[in-house]
Image: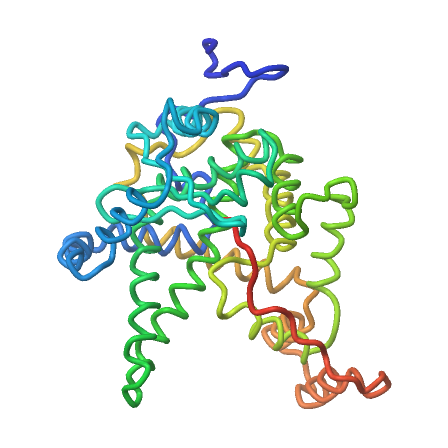
Amino acid sequence: MDEQGREGLPGRTRRRFEGISSRAYEHPADRSALVALRRLTGFDTVLKALSGLLPERSLRLLFLSDSVRVGETQFPRLHAMLVDACHVLDLERVPQMYVQQDPKPNAMCIGLDEPIIVVTTGLVELLDEEELRAVVGHEVGHALSGHAVYRTVLLFLTNLALKVAWIPLGTVAITAITTALREWFRKSELSADRAGLLVGQDLQASLRGLMKIAGGNHLYEMDVDAFLAQAEEYEAGGDLRDSVLKILNVLPRSHPFTTVRAAELKKWAATRDHQRIMAGHYPRREEDKDASVTDSFRQSASHYADTVRTSKDPLMKLVGDLAGGAGDVAGRLRGRFAGAAGGSGTEPRKGPEGGPEAG
């Protein structure tokens, strides 16, 4: 590693981010929630008190007994990537990693006291070296942000909702909490995608990995630009009915759709925030305790305002019009919901509820 914090890899160099705070790469909505939780006195104590109820111990024993633990003698290539990712993001304690036999490409980071990373054989076999490096960096980003704690809580509540489904109204409160947690977690996935880019420092590899998760190991049959164009079409296409269907389709998911993730990552890679991080200018972990909750919420609100203002989605455009005081609201609603008045009259096709997700 040279004096500027850059480390050599075959054919290129990468920067190491000494002391980097996860606030550097976190999505504004993710960051505001995490800053508030970190500043909430006693929150960690309450979570640890709940640890006896949460399935963390059971999960650890399950992976230890029925998966392969990554190390110097087992999946050494993955082990080297994990150590490297922790080095690049300056994560002092390397999490344990397990490979689980599952043909679906997936990954996750869970745990209350110590995060553990699990990747499936489907993911390992699907991705090439640099694509896999980005995914490992993604999971290390989850660990650095503390997402593993809240992901474990989400898993517990989801399982609990199934167990109390027979009780009248028993799932209402839990469903409300899990819906809110899923919305936050979808934003945390965008944060972790950014962490993966900081580790791999190869945007095309990150985009290819997302494209393969969507379409499988047929890279010669796919094109990144065309894949990104799908995200543009998804965002801008249809009328208000399609906007509502998009919301309904994404609600049960813990991850954003892969085309959306790819488009968001490419957009962030072109921002000044990313450029400043790569130049060595970023928030430090030692400053986290002084992070302002108010500033974080202000940044989050500003982000959502910009999203509404620039979005091509029909519902977001309508929200922007209403916020701007546009007249004839009833007429606009009629016109946009009846956007198919001159169309074919066929029902919009409902998208899949979920699919393989690398998280």
The type of colouring in the image is: rainbow
Say whether residue 329 is left or right of residue 175. right
Q: Residue at x 37, y 42 (%)?
A: 67
- Judging depth in this view, the residue of 333 and 70 nearest the camera is 70
Tell which residue pokes out farthest to the top in this image: 2
Q: Nearer the viewer, residue 239 or 77?
A: 77
Q: Residue at x 62, y 76 (%)?
A: 245
Lateral position of residue 310 relative to residue 166, left or right: right
Residue 298 in percent (x, y) is at 43, 56
Up the image or down, 211 lies above or below 324; here it is above
Q: Nearer the viewer, residue 279 or 295?
A: 279
Q: Is residue 75 above or below residue 68?
A: above
Image coordinates for residue 108, horizontal then vertical, percent? 42, 48
Q: Using residue 276 as the reference point, say whether residue 317 is left or right of it.
A: right
Q: Residue at x 25, y 41 (%)?
A: 114
Residue 102 at x, y percent in the picture: 48, 49
- Residue 60 position in % (x across, y down): 27, 47
Q: Give the vertical position of 80 relative to 10 (above or below).
A: below
Q: How many marks?
A: 0
